[in-house]
Amino acid sequence: TAPPRATFSIAPDFNERISSLTNVVILVDFSVSRASISKQDYYCIEESQRAELLAAETVQEELRNRQYPGCAILTPFIGTFLRDPTNTYDVAEKSGDPSQKLAAPFRTDTNVQTNEEFKQGLLQTMACASYAFGTNNPPPADMDQLSRELLPFVTKNTGADAVLVVVGYGRIVTEGKQFTKGLATGLATAVLTLGLFSVVSMDVPYIETWTVLVDLRDGKVLWSNATFTKNFDPTTNNYLAFWAHPQFHDLPAMPTSSSPTQSPPPPPLSPTP
């Protein structure tokens, strides 16, 4: 059974489009905050990285089980969807370490940091994907114009013709703070012109996930889903099966050789001069 707050959409021409895919790359960004009785809540780099890698490996297995080609993993950022030029966050390297004020994303891979076009392409794609699941925002049908202009740089640097974007926001709560205070909605500004999206805050462990499969050839969103699960630690293996089942239950497998004749791929996008 899917947990509360599940959202799902699929393109009408999904089967025709995925039949011509040759390489799907998995782009994952997880941010984990930690609630504490003795100090201000903060984001933890080490725990975010662990949750990110666990989720990425689980997603890779889900795609491979469905016979998707490629399935290389990219985890270049931590905290992308929290980007807000007017805000900084309390961030610690490890649980219990002193925190410092940092702007999001809190960590960027060196190889991506030195490739500005690739970095901006990834950042914009993730921002557009996560914004689509904000309050009152319908599931996306296409990437916005700015994202479509940057998608060719993602293809150029990965060789992929599709990307599965997985954005997760998790929270670890010590037992002393696990009392119910209700839901509060915090607003964070999405990058560039993407507006506002919501972040759920509550005093129980949880993870909120947005997943979007994008055709890099023209920016069409082929499949998307959003789930919210609570009462487990997103940095442990214990939650993965429970999280992955509702997140990917409705993602179809690649068509088999006995499927109808494949449609030709859409013409590729070109970078704006």
Image: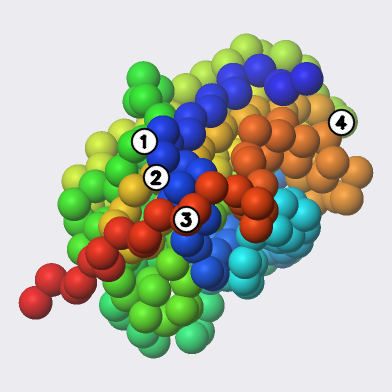
Residue underneath mark 4: 175
Of all residues shown, which one is farthest toward the left?
Answer: 273
Q: Which callout, 4 or 1, points to the residue nearer the camera?
A: 1
Describe residue 15's horizontal placement relative to residue 49 as left or right. Answer: left
Q: Is residue 108 visible?
A: no
Amino acid tagged 3: Gln
Q: Is residue 251 visible?
A: yes
Q: Judge left or right: residue 60 versus residue 142.
A: right
Rounded to the nearest angstrom, the CA distance separating label 2 from label 4 is 40 Å
In this rendering, position of residue 70 left or right of residue 217: right
- If the image is split into quadrants, where does the N terminus sit? top right
Q: Residues within 10 Å of mark 1 (few under 14, many from 20)?
A: many
Q: Secondary structure at mark 2?
A: strand
Residue 70 in percent (x, y) is at: 62, 71
Q: Nearer the viewer, mark 3 or mark 2?
A: 3
Which residue in the protein does label 2 denote? 221
Q: Residue at x 70, y 58 (%)?
A: 67
Please name the residue shown 60% across and 48% down the image.
259
**Pointer 4 or 3: first along the chain:** 4
- Sequence-wise, the earlier of marks 4 and 1 is 1
- Mark 3, secondary structure of its residue: loop
Residue on which the image places disc 3: 262
> How would you rate the neighbour count of disc 3 (Cα within 10 Å): few for under 14, some for 14-19, many for 20 or more?
some
Q: Are marks 2 and 1 in contact (CB under 8 Å)?
A: yes
Label 2 or label 4, whichever lies nearer to me, is 2
Q: Nearer the viewer, mark 4 or mark 3?
A: 3
Q: What amino acid is found at the position of numbered circle 2 in the picture? A: Val
Q: Is residue 132 above or below residue 183?
A: below
